[in-house]
Image (cartoon, rainbow, N blue to C red):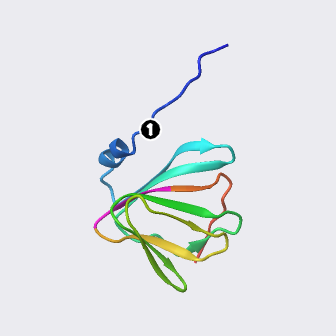
Amino acid sequence: MEPLQLTVIDTKVISAEHPEDYFNTILSSVNDHIVRIGIMTEAYFWHLHPNSDETFLVLEGTLLIDLETGTLELQPGQLLTIPQNTRHRTRPGGERSVNLTIEHKNTETVMG
């Protein structure tokens, strides 16, 4: 039996290494879902996901999630799940936000 290959991922290091305005990459796969890190200094586009819920966990800064019914504000350590087919956009509440996003690996995105 081969030894188990495990990798520790340090989100603070990734955050420090990416000062650009927008960075988004897959960190890990969990069964049929993926975990992404998103770093943003500007608003993302309005969109929805017809085939997957989308969960956000804030690591640094404030994350604002605009919905058609209003805006939700998440602080570090707070988590929110947006149901599929819900039109939304994310934006930082200050200079920058760093977040984990969990969604189905085959998530479709419809812009607008």
The picture places residue 24, in percent across and down from the top left corner, at 46, 54
Q: Residue furthest bottom?
A: 69
Q: Is residue 94 above or below residue 5?
A: below
Q: Can residue 45 be seen in this view?
A: no
**In the figure, 96 relative to 26: above or below?**
below
Choose top left, top right, bottom left or bottom right for residue 112.
Answer: bottom right
Residue, far right: 51
Q: Mostly what secondary structure, the magenta segment?
A: strand
Q: Taking the image as drawn, is residue 19 in sight? A: yes
The mark tally for this picture is: 1
Q: In which quarter of the image is residue 107?
A: bottom right
Query: On the picture, is 68 further left or further right than 99?
Result: right
Numbered range of the magenta stretch: 95-100
Query: Quarter of the image holding residue 54?
Result: bottom right
Query: Residue pushed farthest top?
Result: 1
Quick check: is 17 in the magenta stretch?
A: no
Q: How crowded is mark 1: few (under 14 residues within 10 Å), some or many (20 or more)?
A: few
> For numbered disc 1, what is the local secondary structure?
loop
Q: Residue 103 in the image: x percent, y percent?
A: 61, 56
Q: Residue at x 67, y 13 (%)?
A: 1
Q: Nearer the viewer, residue 103 or 21?
A: 103
> How far across and down, in percent of the image, does residue 65 sit?
47, 73
Residue at the spot of label 1:
9
Q: Residue at the location (59% across, 77% down)? A: 87
Amino acid type shown at disc 1: Ile
Q: Nearer the viewer, residue 70 or 38?
A: 70
Query: Residue reaching furthest front?
Result: 77
**Residue occupying the point 30% across, 53% down:** 19
29 versus 55 height, above or below: above
Residue at 55 percent across and 49 percent down: it is: 35
